[in-house]
Image: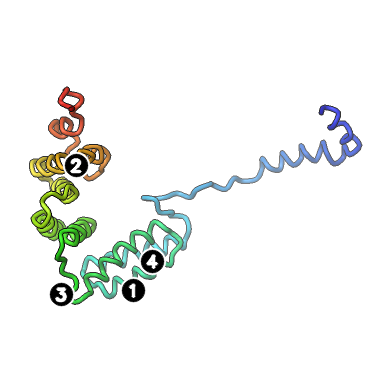
Amino acid sequence: MPKARKPNSANHGRSKSPTRHSAKQLKRKPLTPAHPPQRGGVELVDPRVQAQLKLYDEALSLFHQQKFAKAKGELEKVLEGPSKELADRARMHLKIAEQRMKPSHEQNPKTADEHYQRGVAMMNIGRWDDARESLDKARKASPKADYVHYALAALDCLTGEADSAMKNLKVAIDLRPENRYHARNDEDFAFLQEDPRFTEMLYPEKDGSAN
């Protein structure tokens, strides 16, 4: 194998100095950053993304003003932009806007799951009172649904109601123990991080109360 390199000596003008010269040239070339700066997963450098973000902000403003028809048009434009993150956010709000534009008899949820879905949708846009109303109806219709109690606990955290959050989270864990592990990494429960009751509930092994 070492001998295989010797025949190249005949082409010394093409193999040695150009290689070094090329290496020097490569060092001088400016490096292109692998990933442009981001904010919340959304790229900020690309002017197309900036335009998409502006459209999204305008659509969200219309959405919060409950001007759903106008918001729908703007959100559809956001879907055409290059940022998948913004498109995903717009798609979620677009679905809600289309639901709210339906006749009243079509948009009124009836089943526990429909009330739950509406409650979560209201949480996502910060409409706490509407979210609680829907989740309470879901709990009444399906009292053994652990995910409804879990959502209510998360809502309690978002509205600063620690005692109610602990009560609802305990029910959710009693109904489905796996919820204990979900809550450990759920940002919605950040409000309870300093509460010793929360630590005891999520980490029972620390005080020997685990089964």
Residue in the picture at 25% in, 43% down? 187
Query: In which quarter of the view is residue 93 placed?
Result: bottom left
First in residue order: circle 2 vs circle 1: 1
Residue 11, x across and y down, in percent: 89, 39
Give the secondary structure at mark 1: helix
Mark 3 to mark 2: distance in Å? 34 Å
First in residue order: circle 2 vs circle 4: 4
Left or right side of 119 for 164: left
In the image, residue 59 sits, relative to residue 209, either above or below, namely below
Who is closer to the viewer here, 58 or 63? 63
Q: Residues within 10 Å of mark 1 (few under 14, many from 20)?
A: few
> What is the three-letter code of the residue carrying label 4?
Val
Residue 34, x across and y down, in percent: 53, 47
> What is the three-letter code of the residue carrying label 2?
Arg
Residue, disc 1: 73
Q: Residues within 10 Å of mark 3 (few under 14, many from 20)?
A: few
